[in-house]
Amino acid sequence: MFSDQESPFGEAFDERVVSITDFEADLSAEDWVAKYRVGKLITGPIFWAPIETLAPTRTVGKGRTNLTLIRPTILQTDATTPYAGFDRRESPTRNPAISVHFAPAAYGITGAGTYVFTFAVDAYTRCEFRSTGFAGGGTVDAPGAIRFSGKRAVTVILRNVPAAGQVWAAIEQTDGEAWSWFSTRIAYPPLVFDPLPANG
């Protein structure tokens, strides 16, 4: 029997404060230059503004935009920064994963576009993840298998997605121990400008 202060499920209220700026980016400015340039921006807005952010306390967006969590060990929605915890050791018959489904047309998008899915993950020990997606006739740019520990952003890019498409991006833990997921942001690619030549 547990006292009022004890719980078999860990802390009653997690007071960690986690900011999206705490997560190391997996793509540098040079990587974006190689992947995407302003000259390739055909349609869509000029600025890189988030279209949607899904998190443990916001699992459904507009239309059929939604979140699927596979084998979480805890979903802590009353924490200072809500999170979902995972641990592959606890689910040996199926790998833990997060899948985010996105319906561009539900956000008023009428033409084909490129979308960046950024998963904010904190791996407490070295973990391995596989990232993938479906672009509905477009192409998927995902890092494949990656290993890291600590706070990291994992990016999946879906290119030339039709507005009426039902697309998704996902990360799956393939090795390692405990980790947490805080949010997935869906946005347009950042603008990348070629530097102006120096005046001589």
Image (cartoon, rainbow, N blue to C red):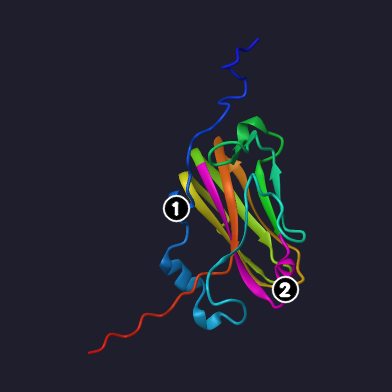
**CA gap, disc 1 and disc 2:** 31 Å
Q: Position of residue 48 (x, y in %)?
A: 53, 69
Q: Where, by quadrant of the figure, is residue 155 drawn? A: bottom right
Q: Position of residue 34 (x, y in %)?
A: 47, 72
Residue 151 is inside the magenta segment: no
The residue lying at 65 percent from left, 69 percent from top is 139
Which amino acid, mark 1?
Thr
Residue, far top: 1
The residue lying at 72 percent from left, 58 percent from top is 65
Q: Which mark is residue 21?
A: 1
Work out whether 52 lies above or below 56.
below
Circle 1 or circle 2, nearest the eye: 1
In this rendering, position of residue 124 left or right of residue 103: left
- Residue count near mark 2 (Cα–Cα under 10 Å), binned few <14, some 14–19, many ≥20: many
Label 1–label 2 contact, CB within 8 A: no
Q: Position of residue 102 (x, y in %)?
A: 70, 61
Q: Which residues are magenta?
A: 102-122
Residue, far front: 4
Considering the image in quadrants, where does the N terminus appear?
top right
Residue 107 is inside the magenta segment: yes
Which amino acid, mark 2?
Pro
Q: Which residue is mark 2?
A: 162
Q: Where, by quadrant of the figure, is residue 41 drawn? A: bottom right
The residue lying at 51 percent from left, 43 percent from top is 122
Work out whether 138 lies above or below 93.
below
Q: Identify which residue, 128 or 171, lies in the foreground.
A: 171
The residue lying at 76 percent from left, 64 percent from top is 166
Residue, far left: 200
